[in-house]
Image (cartoon, coloured by chain):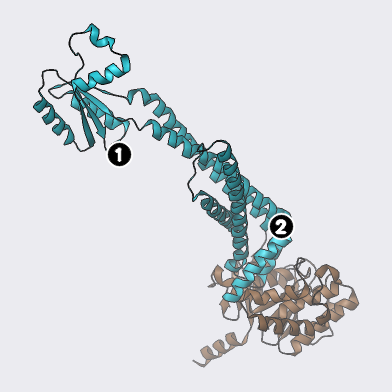
Chain colours: A brown, B cyan
Amino acid sequence: MRTRSLCVKKIVMNMIELQNVKVTYSTGDGIERISFNVAPGEMVFLVGPSGAGKSTVLKTIYLEEWPEEGHVRVADFHSLFIKNKDIPYLRRHLGVVFQDFKLLHDRDVFSNVSFVLEVIGQRKKEIKRHVLRALADVGLSHKSRKYPMELSGGEQQRVSIARAIVNEPNIVLADEPTGNLDPVTASEILDVLVRIHSRGTAVLLATHNYNMVKDYKGRIIRIEHGHLV
Amino acid sequence: MMNSLVYSIQEAFDGFRRARVSTFMTIFTISFLLFIITLFSILFLNADRLVNTLHAEYDIQAFISNTYSEEEVESLRQRVMRLEEIGEVEYVSKKQAAIEFQQEFGDEFFDILEENPLPASLIVKLKQEHQNVNNVKSISAKIAEWEGIDETVHSVTGFDLLIKVSNSARVALVVLLTIVVLGSMFVVSNTIRLIINARRHIIETMELVGATHAFIRRPYLLEGLFQGFLGGTFAAIIVFILLQIVDAQWPNLIWMPATYLLGLVAAGVIFGFLGSLFAVKRFL
């Protein structure tokens, strides 16, 4: 009985849980036997060379890729039981930052961040409050009416981070967030993510650059050729 | 719900602004196709009218034997009236027939002949709902068998070919109209699909931040609906102006129901909505 209650406690404690996850692409690449957890408020660096499978791991977490073996759990959503229509609700528990930013170039910075809240039907007043706070967190309040093309790469990534944190997710997934940036800007972006983490948000950051993250406080998970090492 | 609906409407209008050329093309396509459909409809409605006019002659004339007395003729008339399909029966006496004949051919006829050779007859008219070629033929044949009736004649025989042709023409028009409607749905769907394809990056990002498919679809459906409305309204204005011009030149040449223009707007809305529905279904 005690063992069972401990197990339940453990499940509830982990924000994200991957158990023996396997994904194979038609090219033969992919990931295999990936198991790890991320606890609330934890900082985890997923480190490995390009093509090692870091992005695939993150994609299985927000279910853009489905594990063909094993399972993924995010909060109460379980890959073995989730229905397609519930995937959007799983994603609302996460904030995702992409290497290529994925900003919408037809709308300004404010709208790029606000549409995450429009999606979940927040009230206008609330949206404004949250967006202004998120933009202040990444130091871009003064550029809210600029369009993405008018910003530098580092600033675009900050917008992407503001978008990821605006609905106050429990965890932020960052897929090579500094991959397209120069070292100084990359370090600034990392500082922004660390600041977000320091306020209690869990961060899972995938990067090929071990040297950049080795001095930060956090757990490091290594991945090579689709396997954890 | 209200907030996301407001967002969808705003997005739909922003979509107009962001893709002016595609939006204009969709509206133009819908207008043009509705205009083509209108041309077909004019043919369809007015061809129908012509055929209906020709079909108006559904009388049967039953010639009565010369040996029959007035009473016997009356009982024959009653017998015809009892048939379910018959609306009215008019008796044309020998004398009346002679007068009509005389009016048509002149007085010489009775100068030549000593007695009136024309038989009395019953002009049998079918009820409106039973007026068709088959009924005329079958009733005519049935009455011809009766005692006291020498012969029956009707005028639908000459129309047989014309009716066949007009029926085929109507079928052809319906087929063409269906093809044009389906074609227009396809064109509208493809135009909207191009618009959506250009925005797939936005759709992908929306999916990644947790937008439901229904939420992503809604602005496109509204956009299709608005475009359809504008396309339909534009087509209705053009058709209205053209009908005025034609009517001024050739009064009563073309007949259109008063609600047709409203129907055009409604058809535009339906085209736009269904077109965008098919288009988004391919993506989401």
Chain ID of residue with mark 2: B
* Front-most of residues A120 and B157: B157
Q: Please identify the quarter of the rendering in which residue B92 is found.
A: top left
Placement of B62 over or under B251, stated as above or below: above
Question: Can see residue A46?
Answer: no
The span from disc 1 to disc 2 (Cα, nearest Å) is 58 Å
Q: Quadrant location of the C terminus of chain B? A: bottom right
The disc, 1 or 2, on the residue closer to the chain's N-terminal end is 1
* Front-most of residues B227 and A73: B227
Question: Can see residue A4?
Answer: yes
Placement of B179 over or under B224, stated as above or below: above
Percent x, y for residue A161?
Answer: 76, 78
Frontmost of labels 1 and 2 is: 1
Q: Residues within 10 Å of mark 1 (few under 14, many from 20)?
A: few
Residue positioned 36% across, 32% down in the render: B55
Q: Which mark is residue B128?
A: 1
Residue that carries the numbered disc 2 in the rendered image: B198
Placement of A224 over or under A7, stated as above or below: above
At label 1, the amino acid type is Gln
Same subunit, tags 1 and 2: yes
Percent x, y for residue A130?
Answer: 70, 83
Q: As drawn, which residue projects farthest toward the bottom?
A: A2
Placement of A173 over or under B251, stated as above or below: below
SS class, disc 1 = helix
Percent x, y for residue A95?
Answer: 69, 77
Q: Is residue A100 left or right of residue B38?
A: right
Q: Please identify the quarter of the rendering in which residue B62 is found.
A: top left
